[in-house]
Image: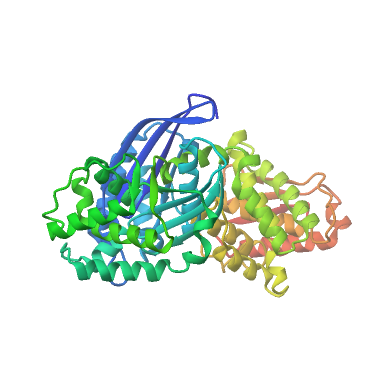
Amino acid sequence: MQNGTRLAAVDLGSNSFRLEIGRLDHGQIHRTEYLKETVRQGNGLDAERNLTLDAMQRGWDCLARFGERLAGFRKSQVRAVATQTLREARNRDEFLERAHQVLGFPIDVIPGREEARLIYQGVAHLLPQSDERRLVVDIGGRSTELILGQAFDARVMESYRVGSVAWSMKYFPDGQFTPHAFQMAEIAAKAVLDEALSVYRRDTWDVAYGSSGTIGAVGDALTAAGWPEGAVTRDGLNWLLERLLAARSADRLRLDGVKEDRRAVIGGGLCVLRAVFDLLGMDQMQAAQGALRHGVLYDLLDRDQEQTDLRTTTVQRLASKFDVDAAQAQRVGRVAHQLLRQLRAGDTANELARLQRKLDWAAQLHEIGCLISHSDYHKHGAYILDNADAPGFALPELHHLSLLVLGHRGKLRKLIVDFEDAVFVGQLLCLRLAVILCHARRDPDLKGLQLEATPGADHRLLLTCRPGWADTYPQSAHLLREEVLAWQKTPWTLQLAGC
């Protein structure tokens, strides 16, 4: 990306939605605009973990306003991510379909550990560089992330299902602050976070940093009351607890530094933060400027180049872990690339490179299920990808990859996909054809093979072979004719010429 490029990150948190816009300047992103709206979508999950219509409408209304501000941005300049509330919501697809429309950009629901990684990147990029070992803590509305890292390297990441909105709803449902409620809330938070004791021991980090949300609000309140700026201490937390108990309810709480939109969830957030301090033997934490949205912005830069795209490294790690046949994977990838270049000849170089990168990941991983069993290995591979810990990937990206792996062989009706998505269909067809052409596990003869969309006809694809090719490679020709039959069960038609 060129200096001066504008980038934007949208963070769909459980308590607030945030929009961060910055301008790239020699590897650094400088804020030009920041918008935040308290949506409290985390309050809108019912007993069946469905978002209520009111909660969805609040989200759609906010995203429509953000979308107006993002008019004119290209897709490559914007990334929107959603966290714990939409990870939990059973009806998230209903929300996301309209949310995509009103925002104007796709929204990635990211796994908890990926959220943790991006939070660390945001914090690290806004801190002075040093060799100190860092513990980063982020208490959100429905989850808390803990990360150990050094410089820009996040080494240990975990996400726990405890947060300010969830705990406030559960232990302070009427906004009443009592000693018993605080005691029960802290005990419950410690029970969830207990496993962090063995991983985030005091001897594993030098400095603790708190990111965004609850910790930022607590830090602001302490600073306004005269405590050292930028620091959250155990004594300060005790003082704040006394102030909340004295107020007796969220409605009556009047505390400098605590904004109106934070009062309703400050009780639950404080309990979680006190639990973290107690469990990890912490006396002080520094309030950090960086947050998830900043990590998303810097991740956009990394995704722009294949050599810095963490997803490529993750794919390589998975391929190694599941002992794939590397030579065959590369062979299938090369053939699929060639076919996709032919099929998408009208795409720009950047768009084609993006599609080829994702297709290459599928080629690298299409046989990972073989380590479990060669029988139905494509199904095993798809299951692995849908459930893998895959740094850099959002949940929809992983599912897209799993669908390509599941669909690279066999019947197509097993795929629950939108066959009107020409981009996905093209990637799937190129992968299936590449697997067929490489069935003998040697480089195929591709001279004269041409894949194209039939001019003037919707949903028709044509594969042309040179004269005599089918006689020279009868097994490949037979498999291609079987592939024609497979596509007859879809809205698409594959035709062969000379094969």
133 displayed left or right of 105: right
- Please tell me in which quadrant of the rendered image residue 474 appears: bottom right
Q: Is residue 65 visible?
A: yes
Q: How is the image coloured?
A: rainbow
- Return the residue found at the far right: 472
190 displayed left or right of 361: left
Q: Is residue 102 visible?
A: no
84 displayed left or right of 351: left
Q: Does residue 486 lie above or below 116 as drawn?
A: below
Residue at screen point 59% across, 34% down: 348
**Number of numbered discs visible in the structure rendering:** 0
- Which residue occupies the foreground of this view, 16 or 277? 277
- Which residue occupies the foreground of this view, 148 or 54? 148
413 displayed left or right of 60: right
Q: Does residue 259 lie above or below 147 as drawn?
A: above
Placement of the C terminus among the 4 image quadrants:
bottom right
Q: Does residue 349 lie above or below 360 as drawn?
A: above
Q: Position of residue 273 (x, y in %)?
A: 34, 57
Q: Position of residue 80 (x, y in %)?
A: 42, 45
Q: Position of residue 65 (x, y in %)?
A: 28, 40
Residue at screen point 53% across, 63% down: 199
Placement of the N terminus among the 4 image quadrants:
top right
